[in-house]
Amino acid sequence: MKKYLKFIYIGIVVLFLYLPIIALVVLSFNESKSMSVFSGFSLKWYEEMFSNRMIMQAVINTFTIAITASVTATIIGTFAAVGIDGMKTKQQNLILGFNNIPLLNADIVTGIALLLTFLMFGISLNWGTVYLAHVTFCIPYVILSVRPRVNKSVNTLYEAALDLGASRFYAFVKIVLPELRPGILAGLLLSFTMSVDDFVITHFTRGAGINTISTLIYSQVKVGIRPSLFALSTIIFALVLVMLLLVNFLSKGRKESVIY
Amino acid sequence: MKELIKLENITKNFGNLRVLDDFSLTVHENEFITLLGPSGCGKTTILRILGGFETADVGRVFFEGKDITDLPANKRNLNTVFQKYALFPHMDVKANIAFGLKINGKSQKYIDDKVDYALKLVNLNGFEKRSIDKLSGGQQQRIAMARAIVNEPKVLLLDEPLGALDLKLRQEMQYELIRLKKELGITFIYVTHDQEEALTMSDKVIVINDGYIQQMGTPEEIYNEPENAFVADFIGDSNIIDGLMIKDRLVRINGAEFPCIDEGFGNNKPVDVVIRPEDVLVKDRGYGRINGTVLTRVFIGVHYEMLIKSGENDFEWLVQCYEKYDIGDEVSLDVIPSNIQIMHKPTSSDEEAIDIDI
Ligand SMILES: Nc1ncnc2c1ncn2[C@@H]1O[C@H](COP(=O)(O)OP(=O)(O)OP(=O)(O)O)[C@@H](O)[C@H]1O
Ligand SMILES: [Mg+2]
């Protein structure tokens, strides 16, 4: 009986979490445009989605920005994390404190601040400004995930490499980077998801011409959402699911999983 | 012997903490030198300055007569065995050992032979493909040695290389290290806080405290003729007693007069007297110089260790002997003249420091 209750409980929790998504998936295969009644199976919304140039452009924008911004942020953040380690404790605490502020700051403040900055310097809003904005808010996450890996034992390994005659660059690439890899990968994935996820900051920095998936959906709300956007959301959900499974599968057998 | 390394007037501060103060040291070719001192006395810092990982605030470092003070670590012809081995965890044993050789652009054939030779030397042949986390502590220690010696350094710096091993393995490795040192014919600068290790292995021991050299000498000199109370106390157990030098070759300890062999301390001068516990002779009442009562007794393997209270100020002697006395037994103590070591009393710790400074 007790076991029974346990399953019911878990069932309810899962239902709460996934019911909305199930609703979304089901409605994306709906024949009619209705948001409440399922009148029959069809793939026409998927067709509409793939033939809609605006949607396709938004998808391309979302992923090109996410990939380039997360890679850029990961490179900058990794070097920053290593550099911070070489500082005096006081400076370290100061910098890490500054690093945490953007994390806690409301997105809307960051968004408006970036918008004003771009305007002040006369930079017209486009793909590039969104990219820069995403790099900006991703860097702190990378620092946060790489920084704990840069510890005393990595430092000693680096010194051991120098001791054996390695140049600083060689020691960094051959010894330090492999040690930091789990942190770097975590930072990269985190940045990527944050970037794909972001709506508020993108909204303020995108200008008139370009849309990402989230800003596109938002702009469609005003004119009425078409089920083709359900189809898009379903595909993105499926992609994320596959990616997660893949990451988990790949990191199995290794000692540390990439996602903690 | 040729002079190999010279540290000249090194001073090093970390913030407000002065770790080394005007520290000078000369190491000759093919010596086994041990830096011995309590935790935090600056031993690792000295090695790091030698290795090029830390720069001294004041002072110079010479290697074969050349000033290498500003030479970066990767250009110095010495290798370090680190306190926690610092083996590269994502490489296997062979890649670890070959690391330095690869950087120096050696041929694959040379590298293979050399790795083979080094593994034989440390008794780990066949371990090439092992990953580092599948090695025991003692094996890691040997690989760390192998990784350092394949580069044929003139000097090997070892920072408490046996610190993480258990007693039995540590003793085994001590002999291994001495053998390696003989076979390779290179200079060892060895750091430890274990006095037994220092005495067993080295040609020369340097006792350090608070960044000052307290005494420098052969293990025998350090053990038998400690120059001050710190060294006497740090090197093995010992009884350090307030004494009064009555005249040359006669000292008053604990209310009784003992003949000794030291001269030149003056007449009626207060001194520190060091007597090793194994040098105290326990006799039946009436046969020794001072009377005492056995307070405690423990059996520590070969012999008994006892605390014996005696004399006018109830000094508690630490005594080791083979015979068994019971707690409360009334006994008598004696020491032969050559086992009594007389030292000047430091007037204050400042003066002690200045003394060594000059
Ligand atoms: N990078 C550093 N920053 C600040 N203080 C340091 C630093 N390195 C060492 N110290 C301090 O310098 C003193 C000497 O340190 P060192 O590591 O040389 O000691 P040690 O003799 O090797 O001790 P142990 O036997 O515990 O290894 C210690 O008080 C230590 O706290
Ligand atoms: Mg140390």
Image: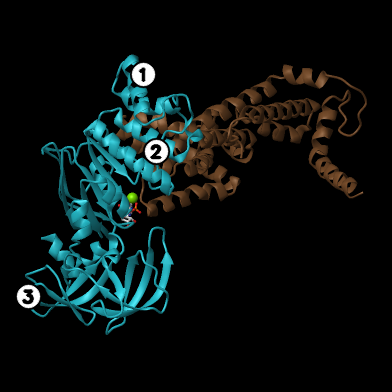
Q: Residue at x 22, y 82 (%)?
A: B255
Q: Which image quarter is the C terminus of chain B in?
A: bottom left
Which residue in the protein does label 2 denote?
B141
Marks 2 and 1: in contact by CB < 8 Å?
Answer: no
Marks 1 and 3: in contact by CB < 8 Å?
Answer: no
Which residue in the protein does label 1 denote?
B112
Determine whether, in the image, residue A128 is placed left or right of residue B58: right
- Is label 1 within 8 A of ligand 2 (CB to nearest ligand atom)? no
Placement of A52 over or under A10, stated as above or below: above
Which of marks 3 and 2 precedes in the sequence? Answer: 2
Question: Chain letter of disc 3?
Answer: B
Identified by mark 1, the residue type is Asp
Residue B5: image x %, image y %?
16, 41
Give the spatial CA distance, label 3 vs label 1: 67 Å
Question: Chain letter of disc 1?
Answer: B
The mark closer to the camera, 2 or 3, is 3
Q: Residues within 10 Å of mark 3 (few under 14, many from 20)?
A: few
Chain appearing in brown on the rendered image: A
